[in-house]
Amino acid sequence: MSILNETADFVKGPVVTRVMPLFYIFIIIISLPLNAVALVTFTCWIREKKPAVIYMAHLACVDLLFTLLLPLKIHYQMNASDWVFGEAMCRALTAAYYCYMYCSILLMMCMSVDRLLAIAFPIASLTWRTARKATFICTLAWLLAVAGTVPLLSMKQTFKIKDMGVTCHDALVHNNPADQLYMYLFSILSCLYYFVPLVVTLLSYSIIIYVLRTKSNQFAEPSSLSEKRKRAVIMAVAVLMVFVMCFAPTNGILLYHCLLLATGFNSGEGDSSYAAYLLAVCLGSSSVFLDPLLYYYSSSQCRQQIRSVFKRDKAKKKNNLTM
């Protein structure tokens, strides 16, 4: 196989071999401690396991597992996109990225629906919003995310490219009918896993803001409701950032790739989206250190736990000074 000279130059250039690995290293430095602390907080420190806590614990677990695989991505790009770890490891890393993306999106959707039920139907939703049901929904999200990666695990992912080396998932051969079918299926699944949760999440937060605004006008507790509405707006903006900045580029390129397959694949057109795809994957990985913002603003238990830790630290410092 061969690719355009411009694409080969980009892959071997400083953006891919230096800037992007540095960005992945930055992600690891920020994500590992934040998500490790978040996971410990949700599983050990918070005793009352509300549905929101369970969803966030699973989201922190997803982020942490994906972060631990990023060193393979760093090595691959610093090595000018020459994969040295074999076909099986390439399939595992590729599936892990999309599994992380799908699971994150599904869990964020679940969090938004849970918050909508808690605010709009606080009494009626109590029978639905239980720890047991939240755990079942999280398990279902994991299973759906893994199922979405089956087409990738079924396709050959490593190919020898002239003047480059062995690529991992970045270049695919389209003369195999079975692989073409899998690619169609994968692209359609990606769109469903992205656009449906996006619509549900945006609708949920829109209704939440509307309900809080209506309540603040009706009841004599404008300050507390105003604070809740403020947090809801921040949550909506944060979730929208994650959906648009982190996951929209990757899914947009997959949709474009699906259209290329449907209309007749042209190697030049495929190469033109190669650089955009690499940048999209890089952006998609940044969700792992943006998610802690969601933890803080979506859970009062999380905020209380963090504040109590800071209070304990301040108390210890005061005691040390008085001794």
Image (cartoon, grey):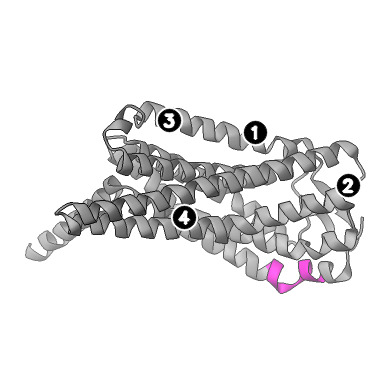
- The residue to which callout 4 is attached is 239
Quarter of the image with the C terminus in it: bottom left
Residue 147 — which label? 1
Question: Marks 4 and 2, how far apart in space?
Answer: 35 Å
Specify the segment rendered in magenta.
9-17
Q: Residue at x 14, y 54 (%)?
A: 220
Answer with mark 4 or mark 1, whichever residue precedes in sequence. Answer: 1
* Residue 169 forms part of the magenta stretch: no
Tell me the SS state at disc 2.
loop
Please name the residue that numbered disc 2 is placed on.
174
**Horizontal arrangement in the rendering, residue 149 relative to residue 137 (left or right):** right
Q: In the figure, 80 relative to 302: above or below?
A: below
**Is 32 left or right of 83, judged from the image as shown?**
left
Determine whether label 1 and label 2 are within 8 Å by CB. Answer: no
The residue at which mark 3 appears reads as 135
Residue 297 image offset from top left, x and y in percent: 34, 54
> Is residue 63 placed above or below 133 in the rendered structure?
below
Percent of width and height locating residue 129? 35, 32
- Find numbered disc 4 in the image and state the secondary structure of the residue it sits on: helix
Amino acid type at mark 3: Thr
Q: Earlier in the sequence, mark 3 or mark 1?
A: 3
Residue 248 drawn at (x, y percent): 61, 57
